[in-house]
Amino acid sequence: MNKRNLILVLIVFLSVVVGLILGNLLAHRAGLRGTQGDYSFLSKSFSSNKLDEVLALIDQQYVDSIDVNELTEEMMVDLIAKLDPHSVYIPAADLENVNSELEGSFSGIGVQFNIQNDTITIVSVISGGPSEKVGLLAGDRIVEVNDTAFTGKKVTNEKVMKKLRGKANTKVKLGIRRHGTAEKLTYTVTRGEIPVNSVDVSYIIAPQTGFIKVSKFAATTYSEFLNAIADLRAKGARKYIIDLRENSGGFMDQAINMVNEFLPANQMIVYSEGKAYPRYEARATGKGSLISAPVVVLIDEFSASASEIFAGAIQDNDRGTVIGRRSFGKGLVQQQMDLTDGSAVRLTVARYYTPSGRSIQKPYENGKADDYELDILNRYMHGEIDNKDSVQLKDTLKYKTLKGRTVYGGGGIMPDIFVSRDTSEYSTYLNKVVNYGYLYQFAFQYSDQHRNTLKAFRDWQKMEAHLNTQNLLAEFVKFAGTKGVKPTGRDLAISGKFIQRQLNAYITRNIIGENGFYPLFYKDDKTILKAIDVLANKKASK
């Protein structure tokens, strides 16, 4: 792997590891909420043990004063981490935010924001949300919160979330600066429930072909999926691409319900079992609405957990074609158990198996061992992301699909059709402007400066046509130059078209939203183009 790509890979790797922690709720609905602090199954020997004795001794006898509660928190993190890579302790202070990622909603003011020049800038206002109701607009700057100045280096994403989120029906007073208005404006916003979408986008991507991107399996994913299917059918879709790339997982039942829409009656979807976890089997009801619809599933090295359940069920039942790169390899089931102090443990209670009987969990030892954490980075370094022949699968872990095809366990889902990442437009210049965030920064600045003109375009096709006449690439090169990053002629020859497409996509997102962003962002995506080709040639199983 070229050194120039290493920083980009590390950034993507670290961001998805965070997603994996948020996506570790895989127990079926009977056990999702844990025991809510009821630990009657624990014996007395566990309620007063050596750990309690040691903490008491430290508290009472240690030479210096020690915050035993803080020490206990640190010990809990280390203790649970020793078990396996996916069991995790969640402090009480973090639990609400962690849960909200998968619950389907949270209470807030209903805006998407970005921090530019140490100031909170509203990127978009959620339709029907609390902020829209009082008149906040995209492009507004939040400079005060509850009559206190809130700008400068102290402003971070975490602090903004704490300020703007809160219980429903509580109020927050905002001081606003708006382009074209000299005086500071004041709005009082009553917080309300804000939906958290897990189906990022759905649209007709080719004749009779619906595209659905699912970013995680949250509490509302299945209902969002059904709404997307209904909308696509009304627009003429008869075959489907389900994009699970970079989907780190979530609720098992949502993945089961989704794949049930594609499978005939009684076909196995997944089964799970553990020491104290009775075998649980999920089979198709035969009542799905897409049983005869051709389908392709897209996965990559960041597709994990519930994503692998979905892809594994489609693959093992020979129901569709899986395209992309080997998935993450997480076959462990977590159950959340709430503790009496408001914290929680997400504990691995079982393993799950695809219909052919394979566990796709990749090897791990000593809990969060370095080799496990660095597995994806090692795949990049060893060339697996760029070359199918570099993929190493154990011949001893062979399984058979419903029709007798060979599939492998012990290390994720290997796709039916491998598609390497596209490096044809990579250059040193591109890597720098991506790693430093300059593409996004320029797109945001451009959107803000031209908002009145751009908001006239309500679909991505017209927006793209307009942006292609604006010489964006030259403006961006000047912008990046002010940051000390300058291209060679060769850099622009290699990466110029890619940069233009990215700028078009990000600017469109700032004005129109996700429905305008993804069609541009994925316009020349190799994996999607392969999926369209497979469906067009009727190679996907019906």
Image (cartoon, grey):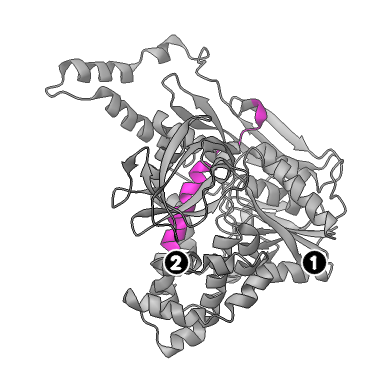
Q: Amino acid at mark 1?
A: Leu
Question: Which residue in the rendered view is the most extreme toward the left?
Answer: 63
Q: Is 5 within the magenta?
A: no
* Among numbered discs 2 and 1, the one appearing first in the sequence: 2
Q: State the residue in front, 137 or 69.
A: 137
Of helix, strand and loop, which one carries label 2? helix
Q: Residue 445 bears which disc, if any?
A: 2
Name the amino acid type tagged 2: Gln
**Residue 145's disc number:** none
Quadrant placement of the N terminus: bottom left
Q: Which residue is mark 1?
A: 535
Q: Quadrant of the C terminus?
A: bottom right
In the image, residue 427 lies at what x, y percent? 45, 79
Res. 367 visible in picture: no
Between circles 2 and 1, the one closer to the viewer is: 2
Q: Main secondary structure of the magenta part?
A: helix
- Indicate whether 51 appears above or below 475: above
**Residue in the foreground of this view, choosing between 275 and 430:** 430
- Residue 424: give x, y in percent of width and height: 54, 79
Of 249 and 523, the residue lying toward us: 523
- Classify residue 89 as left or right of residue 229: left
Examine the image and state in which quarter residue 518 appears.
Answer: bottom right
Crowd tier of the residue under label 1, counting other residues whose Cα lies within 10 Å: few below 14, some 14–19, many 20 or above: many
**In-image side of 57 versus 512 (left or right):** left
Q: Is residue 337 above or below residue 56?
A: below
| Badge count | 2
Question: Foreground: 315 or 15?
Answer: 15
Q: Which residues are magenta?
A: 9-30
Query: Relative to 106, is 241 on the left or the right?
Result: right
